[in-house]
Image (cartoon, helix red, strand yellow):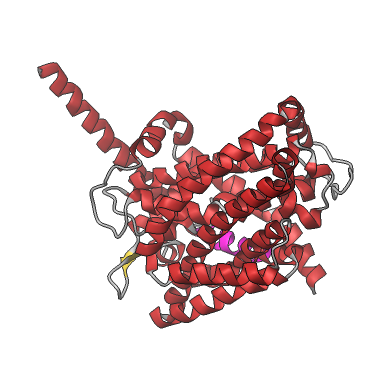
Amino acid sequence: MFNLLKQITDWLWLYPMLVILVGGGILMSFTLRFFQVTKFPFIIGETFGKIFKKSDGSGTITPFQAATSALASTIGAANIVGVPLAIATGGPGAIFWMWLIAIFGCALKYSEIILGIKYRVKNEEGEYVGGPMYYLKNGAKLPFIGSLFAFFLMIEIAPSIATQSASIVQTAQTININPVVTGVTVIIIVGLVVYGGIKRIAKVTEKLVPLMAIAYFLIAAITIGANWSNIPNTFKLIFEGAFNSTAAVGGFAGSVVAATIKAGASRGAYSNEAGMGTSTIAHSAAVTDYPARQGLWGIFEIIVDTLGICTVTAFLVLTTGVWSSVGADKAAAMPSIAIQSVLGNKFGGGFLTICMMMFVLSTLIVVIFYGEKQAEYLFGLKASKVARFVYLGFIMVGALCNLGNIVVLLDFTLAGVIGTNMIGVVKLRKEVKKESDRFFRSIEFKNQRINENDKII
C-alpha cells in the first residue's frame, strides 16, 4: 500500500502538480502583466520599506504580524531540511526548479491573499477568518470544493507537523539529545503559544521570525564563505543538473531529470506555499485598506523564504560537499554537518539545533492554527479545540517515525490541497485583476496629487 501511494505521489508531482503550479503561476503572471517584475521596486518599498508602519482599515493583527505569522509556517524544516532532501532525491538541479516555482509563485501568492482578504468573514469570537475554503465557497460559488480543500488541509497538517518534528529530532541527535526529550519539549512550548490564539501567535512570530532568519543567515554565510572557492562549481551543478540526469555519488540517491523536477517543484511549493493558499489564513486577519496591499506581503515572504533562506541552505550543503557524502535518509542532518565542518561539532551542531528549534517552533505554532481553522470551518468552533490536541500529538509521532515515509504522505495530501485551491484562484482571476488594478490606480492617483501639490508650492 505504501509503495503504491509513493508511486501515485511521484506521478502527481511529476505531471499534474507541475502543470498546475507552473501553469497557474504563468497564467496569473500574464493576468497581472508580470507585475512582480515590472513593479518590483514598488513592492520592495511597500514591504521591506514599511515593516513597522501601521495600516488603515479593518482587521485583527498588523500587516507585518500577518506576514511574519505566514512566514513562520514557511520558514521551517522546508528551508533547512526540505532543501537538502530535494538535493538528495533530485540532485542539485532541483534548486533551479525551486527558483522557477518561486518566480511564478509570486503572482500566485499575491492572488491568493487578495482573495483571502476580499472574502474573509468574522467568526464567533469576533476575529477575522479567511482562506481558500471561504473564497471557494463565497467567491467561486463552489462550497463542496471549499470543504474538500479544508478536509485535505486538515489531514495534510498532520504529516506536516510530523515532518517538522522529525527534522528537529534528527538535528538534535547530532549532539546526542534523546528524541523523546526533544518531542516532549516541543509539545510543551508549542501548546503554551497556540492556546493564546492568533493574537498571541502574531506577537510571538513577529519577534521570533526576524531573529531566527538573521541568525541563520550569518552562520550559513560564514560556512559558505569558508568554502568560497566552490561557489562557481555550485552554480554549475545547479544549472547543469536542472536539465541533465545526475549519476549517483557517495550517499547521493541519484536521479533523472524527471526526479529532479519533481523534487524541486514539491519542495518549492512546500517551502513558500504559493499555490497552496494556506498563508491566506494568516493574512486574512490583517488590518489593511486594500486586499492588494496585503498581497504584496506574499511576495515579501517568497523573497525571504525561497529566494533567500532556501538558496542559502542549498549553497550550504553544496559548497561543503555534504550532499554527496550523506545518505538521503539522513538529509535532515546535512546542514548541521555542513556547519560543523567549519565551526566544529559543539558550536556548529549546537547552534543549528537552536536555530532548528526556533524554525520548527514557529512553523508548528502557525500550521496548528491553520489546521484548527479547517476543523472550525468543517465542524464548528468546538472541533477546532479538539483538533489542537490531535495535532500536538503528531509532534511525538514525527519524533519517533521515519522521515522518508512521512514525506510521501505529506506530498500526497499536499497535492489535494493545491489542486482544490487552484480551482478557486483560476476561476476568480478576473476578481484578482480587478482588485489589483483598483489598488494601483489609487497609488497612481495619490502620486498625481502629490506631484500637483509640489507644482503649486
The segment highlighted magenta reads 411-423
Q: Main secondary structure of the magenta part?
A: helix
Q: Can you say whether 24 is above or below 156 in the image?
A: above
- Of the 4 image quadrants, the one containing the C terminus is top left
User: Which residue is found at the position 78% from the left and 56% from the top?
Assistant: 330
x%, y% of residue 375?
47, 76
> Most extreme residue toward the left, as rendered?
456
Residue shown at the point (44%, 35%) measured from the top left: 35
Q: Is residue 121 above or below residue 206?
A: below
- Residue at the spot x=52%, y=72% of the render? 188
Q: Is residue 375 left or right of residue 284?
A: right
| Relative vertical location of residue 367 with respect to residue 386 in this rendering, above or below | above
Quarter occupied by residue 45:
top left
> In the displayed structure, does residue 192 sit left or right of residue 255?
left
212 horizontally vs 259: left or right: left
Q: Residue furthest front?
A: 346
Q: How many numbered badges does the structure rendering display? A: 0
Residue 187 at what x, y percent from top left?
A: 55, 71
Can you give x and y, in whole percent of width and height, for residue 239 in the image? 73, 32
> Is residue 212 visible from the viewing direction of this image?
yes
Classify residue 69 by image quadrant.
bottom left
Q: Is residue 422 magenta?
A: yes
Where residue 17 sits, quadrant-wise, is bottom right
Location of residue 285 in the rendering, given as x and y in whole percent from the top left corner: 34, 59
Dividing the image into 4 quarters, which one contains the N terminus? bottom right
Instruction: Say whether residue 145 is visible.
Output: no
Residue at the image position 64 percent from the left and 73 percent from the top: 396
